[in-house]
Amino acid sequence: MKISENLKLVGISMLLAVGLAACDRPGPAETAGKKIDQTADQAGKKIGEAADKVGEKLGEQGVKAGVAIDDAEITAKVKAAIFAEPGLKTLQISVDTVKGVVTLSGSVDTQPSSDRAKALAGAVAGVNEVENRLVVK
């Protein structure tokens, strides 16, 4: 919002400067008025464009933050599902989520444990894909 306020102040300052400069010139008042109107229109457009750009950037950041929160939530749910499963050693399994893609890494005792961890991760809401990088030891 500060950027938008600063842009407004710059625009108003420009209007005043042009208005004062136009008043010093000899000539009809209509010419000065037209120039002030044109400058006001241009300044208004520039301020509007700048405000739109700021709004777009804030919207993009909000979307990115939403994705990060969703990924963190998915990671927590996958970890909870694996932790609740008897027989899986949750301290040896790492979970990472990026844009709904869950990556399982670490080690498990058997292939069925690896398959079960993958199935549990895939069952969590919001998971688009599971990359199973678990190593059977």
Image (cartoon, helix red, strand yellow):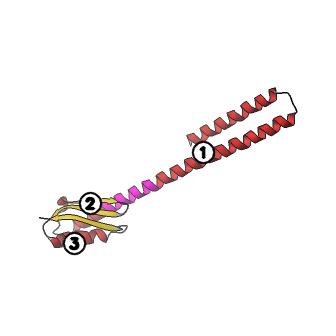
Q: Earlier in the sequence, mark 1 or mark 2?
A: 1
Q: Which residue is mark 3?
A: 116
| Disc 2, SS | strand
Residue at the right extreme of this rendering: 28
Residue that mark 1 sits on: 50
Residue at figure coordinates x 73%, y 32% from the top left: 16
Rendered view: 95 above or below 110: above
Residue drawn at (69%, 34%), measured in percent from left and top? Answer: 14
Q: Would residue 85 appear left or right of 102 to someone viewing this image?
A: left
The amino acid type, in three-letter code, at marker 3 is: Arg
Instruction: Tell me the amino acid under the disc marked 1.
Output: Ala
Question: Is there CB contact under 8 Å for labels 1 and 2?
Answer: no
Tell me whether the residue at label 3 lies in contact with that at label 2, contact meaning CB atoms closer than 8 angstroms. no
The part of the image, by quadrant, that contains residue 104 is bottom left
Amino acid type at image mark 2: Val
* Local secondary structure at mark 1: helix
In percent of width and height, residue 112 lies at: 17, 73
Label whose residue precedes the other's in the sequence (3 or 1) = 1
Residue at 43% across, 53% down: 65
In the rendered image, residue 27 lying in the magenta stretch gets the answer: no
Q: Which residues are magenta?
A: 63-75
Is 76 above or below relative to 42? Answer: below
